[in-house]
Image (spheres, rainbow, N blue to C red):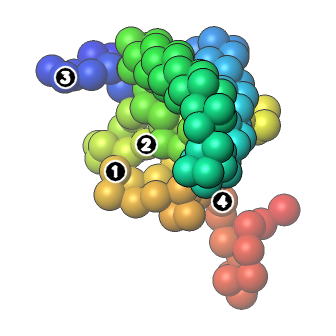
Amino acid sequence: MTRTATKPTFSVAEANRTLPLVRAIAQDIVAEFGRLKEIGRDRRALEVEVASNPKARPRMDALKADIDEGATRIDAYIKELSDLGVELKDPERGLVDFPSERAGRAVWLCWKLGEESVAHWHGMDETFSDRRPIEAGGKRPERRATGEGPAT
């Protein structure tokens, strides 16, 4: 891993070596985020009930405390990722980007929970939907003379 003035950059191999820890943290984030979504739905439904039934207030307060605690846990997980030099892009899908360089240009190596390895990249000003596969050896597959795809 090379360190720039502000943050490290990863080669594909370095990103993949870091992946077991990143994967574990991303799993925790996705699970906690899903739990918080459910609690938020319960709390919103309970807000309506509290208007007519003040006895529901303690349950609503308990849900708010659960949300606050869960948000604190997610913040800690995000800090763990940041300390590793990577960025969480989507807590619901477990989308994580590793800063890198490609042909002298700053890019993101892109990984999503459920993928076996870091195998995609996109430009710094692009998003997940713009990501492209990382070709072996950093080269693009050769095209046939007809332009119909990689030579086999």
Q: Percent position (x, y) of residue 78? A: 46, 23
Which numbered disc, 2 or 1, marks the residue that appears first in the sequence? 2
Q: Where, by quadrant of the figure, is residue 119 drawn?
A: top right
Is 39 drawn above or below residue 2 in the view shown?
below
**Side (left or right) of 149 relative to 57:** right
Is 46 drawn above or below residue 74 in the view shown?
below
To which residue does mark 4 refer? 141
Which numbered disc, 3 or 1, marks the residue that appears first in the sequence? 3
CA distance separating discs 4 and 1: 23 Å
Q: Secondary structure at mark 4?
A: loop
Identify the residue shown where x is 39% and y is 54%. 123
Q: Secondary structure at mark 3?
A: loop
Q: Nearer the viewer, residue 38 or 73?
A: 38
| Image quadrant where one finds the N terminus | top left
To which residue does mark 2 refer? 108
Q: Percent position (x, y) of residue 125? A: 32, 57
Identify the amino acid type marked 3.
Thr
Q: Nearer the viewer, residue 9 or 40?
A: 40
Identify the amino acid type marked 4.
Pro
Which numbered disc, 3 or 4, marks the residue that appears first in the sequence? 3
The residue carrying pointer 2 sits among few (fewer than 14), some (14 to 19) or many (20 or more) residues within 10 Å by Cα, namely many
CA distance separating discs 2 and 4: 20 Å
Q: Secondary structure at mark 1?
A: loop
Which numbered disc, 2 or 3, marks the residue that appears first in the sequence? 3
Q: Secondary structure at mark 2?
A: strand
Identify the amino acid type marked 2.
Trp
